[in-house]
Amino acid sequence: MVAAWVLGPLGALLLALLLGWLQGAVAAVTRFRAACHHLHHFPRPPWRNWLLGHTGMGKNTEEGLQDVDQLVARYRHGCLWWVSPWLPVLRLFHPDTLRPVLLASAFIAPKDKLFYGFLKPWLGDGLLLSHGDKWARHRRLLTPAFHFDILKSYVSIFNSSTHIMHAKWRAAAEAAGGAVELNVLEHLSLLTLDSLQKCIFSHDSRCQEQPSEYIKAILELSTLVVRRHHRLLHHPSWLYRLSADGRRFARACATVHNFTANVVQRRRQALNRLGHQAWLESHQGRSMDFIDLLLLTKDEDGNTLSDEDISAEADTFMFEGHDTTASGLAWLLYNLAHHPDYQERCRQEACELLKGRDVVEVEWEDLSCLPFTTMCIKESLRLHPPVTAVSRRCTEDITMRDGRVIPKGVICLMSIYGTHHNPDIWPEPQVQPPLARLWDSGTSPSPVSPRHASALVTPGLQPAAVQPREQPGTVPAGLHPLLRRAQVSHGGDAAVPVCHPPPGCPAHGDPGGRGGRNCIGQSFAMAELRVVAALTLARFAVRPDEGRPVRRKTELILRAEDGLWLRLEPLPEEA
């Protein structure tokens, strides 16, 4: 009352706002000081200075990954990284430090908007970007769409898309006179996009053979998101919308959204017109795709997903499923190209499986008959994880096993690459598979058996902890320990990853890596990896392209700076 009488109504309002701001500022400083108190218990690598911190010291180049190797060698569990004087990031490299964050619910450790926010206009509120109750509901509703009985029908699609790619490779090799050098990641990206369009929309755009506006838009969106991350002036949304890249991003989003929305709306109209039973009868004799399954799903209250929700999940599946799987396949071929003895063992395994068949295709039941190829895939994923890191921002303090506390509000950058190259977990972490020395099949135990359920993180945009454990009689004789350690038992099921019920990539959840937050599409991705790998190695010899040395580059996925080039030589048809 006194302030209002002395200053007048406007002055009193300004004073109240000032006092409110000061109170908020004091509370923020107090919270920051408390957080810094906890953060002092984490080691800090040398920085530029107190103002710049570690700004500019993290690179997405070959040298940047080598720097991560050095950080992991020195700070085995993790370290504190200051992006600015007010933005600390905890970089975690060890299962003991990863586990508390991975085991936390999506409410306590949601994805950090700083790292994922640029995807929002494209992917909407799909599983990757949603949080809280919406994430939990959608996760429950989508899980049946990745059941093994559903995935079985997709194997024929993986085969047909691979046949198309191989026909292109043979034609290129014939034109080159026997062998051809190709950027395999580019070809494999088109293959995975082709497969996904057929699995999600039942749409064949023939994108491996001719241009597709939809596929072009997806590839452009991925490029633009990466470019925006590296241009600080493009971080504010209002400024980005005014830029040339922002306008291109908006046009590409419109192309993708229009395609998805048209498919969903047509299916919804058909379902409403025919009725539930008649619509199901119209699908007899053919498999239902991802859109069909989402249209039919209902929660415990009988509520269905909206058209907007279905479109967001379809766009998310297209995004998460193509680049990660393509990267995993490309680096697998790269690793096997540098280890021809192990490539030959994979080839023999595939040829023995396919021998005598009228139609050379891998079937669902065959996936469990490729144990050596599967181990090579997993070791390749360890050496070259498609996604090198994921981030979470804790909404509550998280106490670690050693008593240290990850403070509320701090970003945790969980390094998949660092964990996969941590010498505490993986002795000789840089040794490439199939390896410098063979497994001694004598009596000595494997010296490199992983001791942690969170030590292996498989393809995708979220970490998936896999439980490596050995099973008598399943390891081929002569297998090197670094491949032996990649073997993961999943109860003998043909679908290798049971990481989550699942989706495409990584897992967090219980200590066995099978909790509710693991990658929902992982079984899908692993099935495609094995089908493409087996058919490719049965038909082509893969050699390094000596004229193009590979330098790794981390973007949305792990790439190579000038493409991942390999020399491909067609094998005789009878092989």
Image (tube, rainbow, N blue to C red):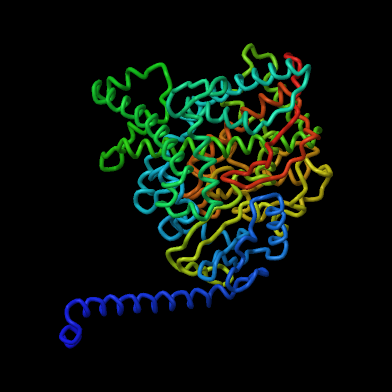
Say whether residue 509 is left or right of residue 135: right
Asked which quadrant contains residue 384, the reply is: top right
In this rendering, is residue 339 above or below 532? below
Residue at x 69%, y 60% (from the top left corner): 72
In this rendering, is residue 460 above or below 153? below
Picture coordinates of residue 408, whole percent (x, y) = 45, 68
Q: Nearer the viewer, residue 333 or 216?
A: 216
Q: Nearer the viewer, residue 410 or 381?
A: 410
Asked which quadrant contains residue 59, the reply is: bottom right
Picture coordinates of residue 534, whole percent (x, y) = 67, 27
Residue 419 seen from this side:
no
In this rendering, is residue 20 above or below 264? below
Q: What is the quadrant of the N terminus in the image?
A: bottom left
Mark count: 0
In this rendering, is residue 108 above or below 551? below
Picture coordinates of residue 195, whole percent (x, y) = 52, 27
Picture coordinates of residue 506, whole percent (x, y) = 54, 46
Q: Nearer the viewer, residue 35 or 177?
A: 177
Residue at x 56%, y 58% (from the top left corner): 413
Q: Residue furthest top?
A: 358
Say whether residue 24 is left or right of residue 243: left
Residue 127 seen from this side:
yes
Residue at x 57%, y 20% (from the top left corner): 209
Residue at x 76%, y 36% (from the top left corner): 548
Q: What is the quadrant of the C terminus in the image?
A: top right
